[in-house]
Image (tube, grey):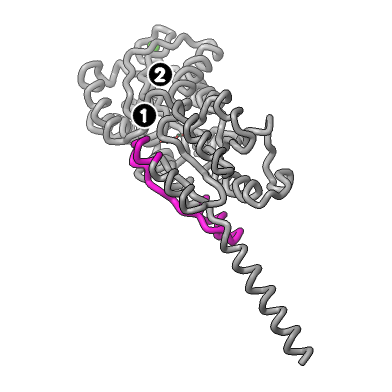
């Protein structure tokens, strides 16, 4: 009789433990599923959630803030324990933070950084990402190093660097700061940068290709000494366009150094083929892992010191960027 009782109790305990573990549900909103970098991010968050026995639901905001707002409303109605939000328009974070606060649900923003004044209105609002200026600086350094080590890179021999800038979506911190700090780093390396053209290609490969086709036509590839793209997809679009002009196909006499950010597999591929100069690792694995661990610790009320990532100013987890080249190894 006693044995049966203990057995029943054990089952009850196991069952209730499993049930409570399953109860932790993360509601996550992604600004747009059709984004190569955010795909890596999603995969990382799904893997970490599974590892920790939590359930993560992912919603596609289709690059539309109104759609994303509705998704957040339904997550709150559904009773998710925590939100992870890759906000479409980072400047409209305030009403979302207010909703989470009213519902008593912690909220972790990722990849698109809301202003600190907004984060500061809720003690359970956080941001997990990477410092945009760091990636810009590293991109600029890649170009500056190449220019210094390859005298022929100064095609018109004027000692200055004539470059084209391809930018991501307007208002994104990575668009603003990568554009600024890449040029800053070239100056700091003692080279005078000259922007011969720039355009917004919205992080998108096809748009970048079309824009670059136009620039190659109007400016002439022989007059372009570098292409600096705010991300890899746009760098790859630019490379497609340059190939249409018989540049960047392996002949060093017909080559324009192109740099991006992310270190997506397709960019590493292009670098292996000698079509692309370099990139900067945007560490989706660590950003995704950190976001999920932080979210679960907040949902469970456990010690934030135990998640394995440092939290700065009670608000931020910063994952470092890292330059990636194929240079000396080849
Ligand atoms: C990445 C881009 C991506 C964007 C989405 C950036 O950090 O570098 O590739 O499109 O985030 O918000
Ligand atoms: Ca020059």
As rendered, which of 263 and 74 lies closer to the eye? 74
User: Circle 2 is placed at which residue position?
Assistant: 152
How far separated are the C-alphas under marks 2 and 1? Answer: 10 Å
Can see residue 272?
Answer: no
Q: Residue furthest bottom?
A: 1
Q: Are marks 2 and 1 in contact (CB under 8 Å)?
A: yes
Corner quadrant of residue 215: top left
User: In the picture provided, is 228 more to the left or to the right than 100?
Assistant: left
Magenta region: 44-69
Q: State the SS at label 1.
A: helix
Q: Quadrant of the N terminus?
A: bottom right
Q: State the SS at label 2.
A: helix
User: In the picture provided, is 329 more to the left or to the right than 274?
Assistant: right
Which label belongs to residue 252?
1
Q: Residue at x 74, y 86 (%)?
A: 5
Q: Is residue 162 above or below residue 65?
A: above
């Amino acid at each position: 009789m006693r044995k049966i009782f203990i057995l029943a109790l054990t089952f009850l305990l196991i069952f209730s433990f499993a049930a409570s573990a399953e109860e932790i549900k993360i509601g996550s909103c992604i600004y747009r599923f059709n984004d190569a970098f955010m795909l890596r991010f999603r995969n990382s968050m799904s893997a970490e959630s599974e590892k920790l026995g939590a359930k993560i639901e992912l919603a596609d905001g289709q690059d539309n803030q109104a759609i994303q707002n509705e998704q957040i409303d339904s997550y709150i109605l559904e009773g998710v324990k925590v939100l992870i939000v890759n906000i479409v328009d980072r400047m409209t974070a305030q009403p979302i933070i207010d909703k989470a606060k009213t519902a008593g649900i912690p909220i972790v923003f990722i990849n698109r950084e809301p202003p600190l004044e907004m984060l500061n209105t809720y003690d359970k609002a956080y941001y997990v990402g990477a410092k945009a200026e760091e990636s810009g600086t590293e991109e600029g350094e890649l170009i500056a190093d190449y220019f210094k080590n390859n005298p022929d890179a100064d095609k018109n021999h004027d000692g200055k660097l004539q470059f084209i800038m391809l930018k991501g979506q307007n208002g994104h911190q990575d668009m603003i700061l990568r554009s600024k700090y890449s040029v800053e780093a070239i100056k700091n390396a003692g080279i005078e940068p000259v922007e011969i053209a720039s355009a917004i290609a919205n992080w998108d490969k096809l748009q970048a290709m079309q824009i670059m086709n136009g620039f190659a036509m109007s400016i002439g590839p022989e007059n372009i000494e570098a292409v600096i793209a705010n991300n890899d997809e746009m760098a790859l679009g630019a490379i497609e366009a340059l190939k249409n002009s018989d540049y960047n196909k392996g002949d060093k006499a017909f080559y324009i150094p192109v740099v991006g950010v992310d270190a997506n597999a397709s960019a590493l591929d292009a670098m292996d083929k000698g079509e692309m100069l370099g990139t900067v690792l945007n560490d989706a694995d660590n950003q995704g892992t950190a976001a999920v661990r932080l979210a679960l610790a907040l949902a469970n009320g456990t010690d934030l010191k135990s998640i394995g990532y440092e939290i700065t100013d009670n608000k931020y987890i910063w994952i470092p960027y890292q330059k990636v080249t194929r240079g000396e190894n080849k």
